[in-house]
Structure formats: C-alpha cells, structure tokens
Image: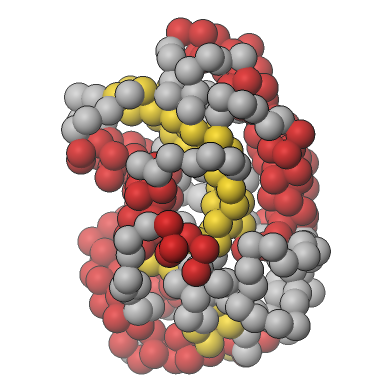
C-alpha cells in the first residue's frame, strides 16, 4: 500500500511514521512544511531518522499550496492518509490567529478536496483534539458529548470535523482522532514536561499557570501510536470519531512537584490562570478499546525518567 502522512516531522506524525516503516510492508510518503513554531533542528533530526528507511519518501510541502497538493495526488495512488499537519499551541493562537486559519482550516480543506478526486483512498485518519469539548461539568467525556470549544484552536478542530461531515464519501472512511495531551520522548518542546526541563537546564524561572491547579489526561506517545496503528488495520463500515486517551487525568501541580524534585529544580513561580485553557481534560476511551485489543496504558509518572534521559541526550536540538 501507499500511505501518506502529513506532519511527518512533527511529534505524533514522526512517531507513527517510524512505527509503520518498522513493519517494512508499505510505502510511506511523508509531507511536512518544517515550520518554525518550535525547533526546526528537532524536526530535521526526526526526519533524518525516517530517511534511513528505504520505503520512505519525503515532500517539503505546505497544505495551503493547493496546486502542489493536487499534483501529489495525481502522481501517487494513496490508499490511506494520516493527517497530523496542523498549527498547534492553544496559547500561540492569541498572537497568531491567521496561522491557525491557514493551516488548520484552509490546509485541511485543500487536503480533503485533493483526496476526493482520488479513486484509491480507502481510509482518511485526521487529528482532532480534546479541545473540541471545551469546559464541561461532567467527566469523562464521551464522543457524543456536546462540543463547545473555549479557544480558536479547539474551534478549528471542531470545524475540521464539520468539514468531514460535508465531504462524506462512499469510497473513503473518515476517522477522527480526538487526541488528549500526548507526551513522551521526541515530544514538542512547548509542552509542559519538556518545557520545564528546558527551563531547569537554562536556570530560568518557570511560570506555572494557575499554580498548577488543573488536570490533564496525559497519554503516552507509544500508547497513541499503538491505538492508531491498530485502527489502521480495522475495516470501518462508516465514518467514526474516537477519543485517544489514557482516561486517567493527572493533577498538573503534582506532576510539576514530582518532576522538579527529580531534577532538583525549584525556580517555579505561580502565574495568573489564563482564560483560554480548560480546568480539566478527561476522556472516555471505551469506544476505541471495544474495537482494538489494548488493555494497558503507561502511567505518566512512570515515564518521567525516560523523558529526562532523552532530554539530556537531545537538549541541544530543543
């Protein structure tokens, strides 16, 4: 099969691409624009690892370039698409809303339109987010919960889901992946764990949002990739949306306390809680677990030493 993965130099895209290449069964085509939202060095390092595989081919494309995208789909007969290319960063949106519109809405629409013209695509997996749920009073949240995003990032992901509904096809199954706080080695430097490690390395004050009094459903990258890989082997009769989560939320204050103790770091100052982030994310994963064979998830606290060791080795890239 021919598989296209957008955002292949990003955290989740890279991790899934590497897993698929390790099976040595399919031709993997990676697409990424290598934007500067965070360290390009890190993205290029991920990419250099992928390029060691003979069945990997890379394209430096931006999804907003419709003509290039259309040509790519004409030149190659893709069977499966994994779409992870997006502008991330809930806080980043405040100063760069246009980047979210370009990447998360225009880019996604271009990809959908290009895929509609193809006769070969059987499955189209796309990354959504727990941010589509917004602030709720009842947890864990299920896929059929009412959606009321609290920020533009969440709104862009909800819009993606709505676009898919308008582009339903008899030949292609569209599978939405509502991802909850993915963490682990090779992760995004702007996310909590790696961000704190970087501040500690540079001996800078770490400002903790709202004194850490909020919760996140941390889901280890290996668990995320394992679920998506198994979903890719599943036959779907209709379009679906799944929560991809651990379903065991972690208190941020507790996580920061344990991590800072491990690295002997105490320059932590509480900052005023911002209004664009929710108090809690906690997803129900029963729907996806009914479909695939997965019983155990990694505990967030149990992975901290691995991430610290990874950071110590690759901190020059962040």
- Residue located at (24% from left, 25% from top): 55
Q: Quadrant of the N terminus?
A: top left
The number of callouts visible is 0
Which corner quadrant of the image does residue 91 belong to? Answer: bottom right
Q: Position of residue 304 (x, y in %)?
A: 32, 77
Residue pictured at 27% horizontal, 45% vertical: 19
> Does residue 29 appear in this view?
no
Quarter of the image with the C terminus is: bottom left
> Is 68 in front, or is 288?
288
123 to 297, vertically: above or below: above
Please name the colour scheme applied to the rendered image: secondary structure
Q: Residue at x 70, y 45 (%)?
A: 161
Residue 118 figure quarter: top right
Q: Nearer the viewer, residue 32 or 115?
A: 115
Residue 166 in view = yes
Q: Nearer the viewer, residue 28 or 293?
A: 293
Going 61% across and 78% down the picture, which residue do you hit? 140
Residue 146 located left or right of residue 204: right
Q: Relative to 111, is 258 on the left or the right? A: left
Residue 76 position by quadrant: top left
| Residue 46 drawn at (x, y percent) | 32, 43
Image coordinates of residue 305 in percent, x first then y, are 26, 77
Q: Is residue 12 above or below residue 50?
A: below
Most foreground residue, 171 or 151 = 171
Q: Residue furthest front?
A: 237
Location of residue 178 in the rendering, given as x and y in whole percent from the top left corner: 58, 57
């Amino acid at each position: 099969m021919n598989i296209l993965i957008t955002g292949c130099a990003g955290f989740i895209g890279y991790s899934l691409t590497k897993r698929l290449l390790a099976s040595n069964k399919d031709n993997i085509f990676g697409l990424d624009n290598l934007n500067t939202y965070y360290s390009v060095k890190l993205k290029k390092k991920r990419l250099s690892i992928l390029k060691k595989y003979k069945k990997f081919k890379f394209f430096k494309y931006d999804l907003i370039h419709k003509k290039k995208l259309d040509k790519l789909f004409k030149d190659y007969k893709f069977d499966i698409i994994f779409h992870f290319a997006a502008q991330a960063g809930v806080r980043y949106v405040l100063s760069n809303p246009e980047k979210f519109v370009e990447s998360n809405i225009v880019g996604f629409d271009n990809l959908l339109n290009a895929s509609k013209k193809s006769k070969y695509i059987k499955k189209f997996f796309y990354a959504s987010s727990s941010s589509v749920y917004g602030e709720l009073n009842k947890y864990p949240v299920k896929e059929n919960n009412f959606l009321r995003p609290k920020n533009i990032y969440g709104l862009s992901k909800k819009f993606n889901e709505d676009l898919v509904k308008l582009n339903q096809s008899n030949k292609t199954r569209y599978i939405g992946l509502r991802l909850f706080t993915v963490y682990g080695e090779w992760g995004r430097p702007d996310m909590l764990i790696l961000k704190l490690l970087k501040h500690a390395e540079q001996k800078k004050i770490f400002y903790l949002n709202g004194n850490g009094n909020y919760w996140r459903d941390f889901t280890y990258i290996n668990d995320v990739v394992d679920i998506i890989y198994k979903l890719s082997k599943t036959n779907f009769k209709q379009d679906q949306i799944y929560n991809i989560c651990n379903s065991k939320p972690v208190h941020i204050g507790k996580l920061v306390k344990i991590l800072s103790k491990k690295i002997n770091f105490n320059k932590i100052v509480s900052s005023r809680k911002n209004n664009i982030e929710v108090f809690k994310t906690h997803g129900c994963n029963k729907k996806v677990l009914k479909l695939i064979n997965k019983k155990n998830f990694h505990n967030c606290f149990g992975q901290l030493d691995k991430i610290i060791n990874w950071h110590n080795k690759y901190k020059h890239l962040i």
